[in-house]
């Protein structure tokens, strides 16, 4: 059996964030969920629609402790008892958080700093890097799964050199393209909320995302998915066109925006 890496977004935005990354090979299916902002019931339904099940992921990775990323983590821990991999700092926060403190201790697995962590033995390795965002701590992930090098960055106020470096080595990247600057500035948000988004510890704009893409573009990049689009300050068309300007015309990169409230298709990377 030829191995393949598969990806699916269940929801991507302030309404909830959850993604599946999996490997199919001769020994079966192995995978991870990234974030748990969507209910287990909904995840199960969407997995079943693609011929998958809870048995097809082995662990949960957490980027940070904002509610739209951990809303259903307690339920996942209570009912599935899958290992939850996060940094030491994030686990301390989760052990006190009203949504997770009752259930997280039995699932606690700490990601070691500055090294690859084998979260699924012999199949999936993960390395985290810190990005600026106004949570307890926010991280992106570099993931080696099968022959695929995947990077996941969401809720990021600005790209770091480390983030760019990992993206420049990846063949598949999920990157935030949260808002169109003019839509945000001219929109209904309070000045306080606008400042929070814009201050370098909030979110990546479409322009920021395009600039980041230009900085890490390389011949091996195959897939680029735009995530966490704002419902009020962006459109899929604006995000797509902005990112497209950063991609060479003769490139074969698959560029796709991920829907906010609905699942994506099951994508073979």
Image (cartoon, helix red, strand yellow):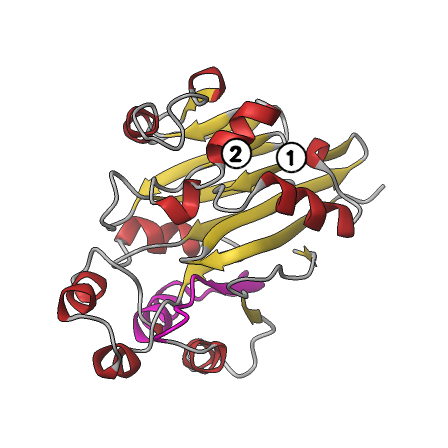
Instruction: Say if 86 sits above or below 244 in the image.
Output: above
Q: Residue furthest top?
A: 106
Q: Is residue 92 left or right of residue 245?
A: left
Would residue 147 be visible to someone looking at this image? no
Where is residue 260? Give x, y as percent: 50, 64
Q: Magenta segment range?
A: 207-233
Residue 220 inside the magenta-drawn segment: yes
Could you tell me which residue is drawn at 62 percent across and 59 percent down? 263
* Quadrant in which the C terminus appears: bottom right
Circles 1 and 2, Cβ within 8 Å, touching? The answer is: yes
Residue denoted by label 2: 60
Q: Is residue 27 left or right of residue 72?
A: right
User: Where does the N terminus fall, quadrant-wise?
Assistant: top right
The residue to which callout 1 is attached is 57
* SS state under label 1: loop
- In this view of the protein, which residue sits in the foreground, 105 or 251? 105
Q: Nearer the viewer, residue 117 or 74?
A: 74
SS at circle 2 = strand
């Amino acid at each position: 059996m030829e191995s393949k890496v598969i990806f699916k977004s269940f929801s991507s935005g302030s309404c909830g964030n959850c993604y599946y990354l999996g490997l199919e090979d001769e020994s079966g299916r192995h995978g991870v969920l990234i974030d748990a902002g969507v209910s287990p019931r909904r995840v199960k339904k969407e997995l079943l629609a693609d011929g998958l099940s809870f048995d097809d992921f082995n662990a949960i990775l957490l980027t940070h402790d904002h509610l739209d990323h951990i809303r259903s983590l307690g339920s996942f821990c209570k009912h599935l008892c899958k290992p939850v991999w996060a940094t030491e700092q994030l686990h301390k926060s989760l052990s006190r958080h009203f949504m997770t403190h009752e259930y997280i201790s039995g699932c606690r697995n700490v990601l070691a700093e500055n090294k690859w962590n084998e979260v699924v033995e012999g199949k999936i390795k993960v390395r985290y890097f810190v990005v600026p965002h106004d949570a307890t701590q926010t991280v992106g992930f570099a993931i080696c799964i099968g022959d695929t090098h995947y990077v996941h960055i969401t809720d990021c106020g600005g790209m770091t050199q480390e983030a760019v470096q990992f993206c420049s080595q990846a063949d598949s990247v999920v990157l935030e393209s949260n808002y169109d600057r003019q839509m945000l500035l001219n929109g209904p948000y309070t000045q306080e909320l606008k400042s929070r988004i814009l201050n370098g510890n909030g979110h990546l704009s479409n322009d920021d995302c395009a600039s980041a893409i230009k900085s890490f573009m390389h011949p091996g990049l195959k897939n680029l998915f735009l995530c966490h689009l704002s419902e009020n300050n962006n459109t899929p068309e604006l995000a797509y066109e902005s990112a497209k300007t950063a991609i060479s015309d003769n490139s074969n990169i698959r560029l796709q925006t991920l829907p906010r409230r609905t699942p994506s298709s099951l994508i073979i990377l």
